[in-house]
Image (spheres, coloured by chain):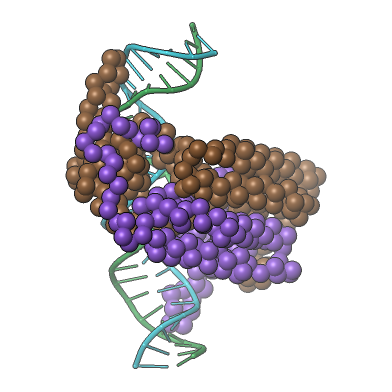
Chain colours: A brown, B purple, C cyan, D green
Amino acid sequence: MDVKTICLGLLSLGDACGYDLKKHFESLFRHFFSAGYGSIYPALADLAESGMVRCQELPQQGRPARKIYSITELGREHFRSALLTQNPTHKLRSDFLVMMYFADQLDRNRLQDLLDQRVSQFRAAAGEIETAAETSPQSQFVAGFSRALATTAAQYLEDNRHLIEGEAQTLSTRSYRNKNTHEVAMNLEERL
Amino acid sequence: MDVKTICLGLLSLGDACGYDLKKHFESLFRHFFSAGYGSIYPALADLAESGMVRCQELPQQGRPARKIYSITELGREHFRSALLTQNPTHKLRSDFLVMMYFADQLDRNRLQDLLDQRVSQFRAAAGEIETAAETSPQSQFVAGFSRALATTAAQYLEDNRHLIEGEAQTLSTRSYRNKNTHEVAMNLEERL
DNA sequence: AAGAGCATGTAACCTGTTACATGATTAT
DNA sequence: ATAATCATGTAACAGGTTACATGCTCTT
């Protein structure tokens, strides 16, 4: 599901301009999907060209005209078909965890900073998701999911950071481990 | 942190060929980072060209020569500097949650399938992460993190799916909601 | 006999990110 | 005054994915 399809989905809930859509991405989908103007505006242009949405310009004083997009019947059908046929992905991409895997090559202070920062971010994310009762059940469902994950993540880091903090390098032990010296025969396999 | 840097990191643990690295991505980083041959091989070529790694060819019977890469001192320094200076990301991208947000436009059976599948996937992910005691603390740490998240995710879906299952469309209610008919004035804002 | 695993790579493609370009209005 | 918000877009770039191309060996 690309930005185009999701814009179409949002427009299925009501008319909006590109600027509005960006804000919705930021509020509704903040924790699991992001999109910038650089993908939203072209997406809307494409959708308009293929007849999925109609566009009505609302002139304004001093600003560019507000281009209000509304979904067409064709667009609705397309979106429904996307919901039916596309099997959705759910992917985490975390350089952070990769770094943690290399914790033993990290300076201890640096490691602690990284962990502290990440814990704060998870806690902040969990906190910023209010359990607003007025929102739709779907909103609550996805927000709750994000909150649950963020809380678990923060808790896990706090409970288990000691496992890797002991491995990090102190300033005095900065010299490289003298592995891997000229021997091709000794490979990754043998070291795991 | 791109594939290139992570290949360098893996090579800092021991020599390997592209094929090996792919397998390591699949085993070690499976749940939070993926890389295909299409990114690994070019990455290794780049690294070799810039002097970060050396390459030694090991001819084989019937197969292409095994190209064994070993990290150089320059490569090690580069990797360390990457660990120190780059601030790592941690991003979820989930079409699945986006779809769940649109649950009310989904057929009920379809919604249940999606939820069932996702729960199975999370459970499978949590299960396939063995708590092998022989592995390094870092390995255990990142594996444990993934396991914790997968478990929470599965549990959340099971505990909260009822919130949105009630919203999904039954086969008889298939007609579109008659919103958004010719009225531009009624926008997304007002509907949230 | 068929399929999985070993082993390399390229090229086209898709998609999203970042930086740029413009400029008035409103809140601090 | 300064910063944030509103509002549009383009163009270059980065990075990864998919499909293609090749072919032997080992297991089922």
The answer to whether residue C27 is above or below residue B133 is above
Q: Residue at (32%, 38%) from the top-left corner? A: A14
Residue A162 shown left or right of residue A66 in the figure: right
Quadrant where the C terminus of chain B sits is top left
**Where is residue A62, by image quadrant?**
top left
Query: Would you say A56 lies left or right of A140 here?
Result: left
Horizontal and vertical percent position of residue A140: 52, 45
Residue at 69 percent of width and 52 percent of height: A156
Residue A136 visible (yes or no): yes
Q: Is residue B123 above or below residue B73?
A: below
Left or right relative to D15: residue C21: left
Residue nearer the viewer, D13 or A136: A136
Q: Nearer the viewer, residue B13 or A51?
A: A51
Q: Compared to C9, does A109 lie above or below?
A: above
Count of marks placed on residues: 0
Q: Residue furthest right?
A: A172
Residue A144 image offset from top left, x and y in percent:
56, 47
Question: In x, y percent, where is residue C17?
Answer: 43, 40
x, y percentage for residue A151? Answer: 64, 47
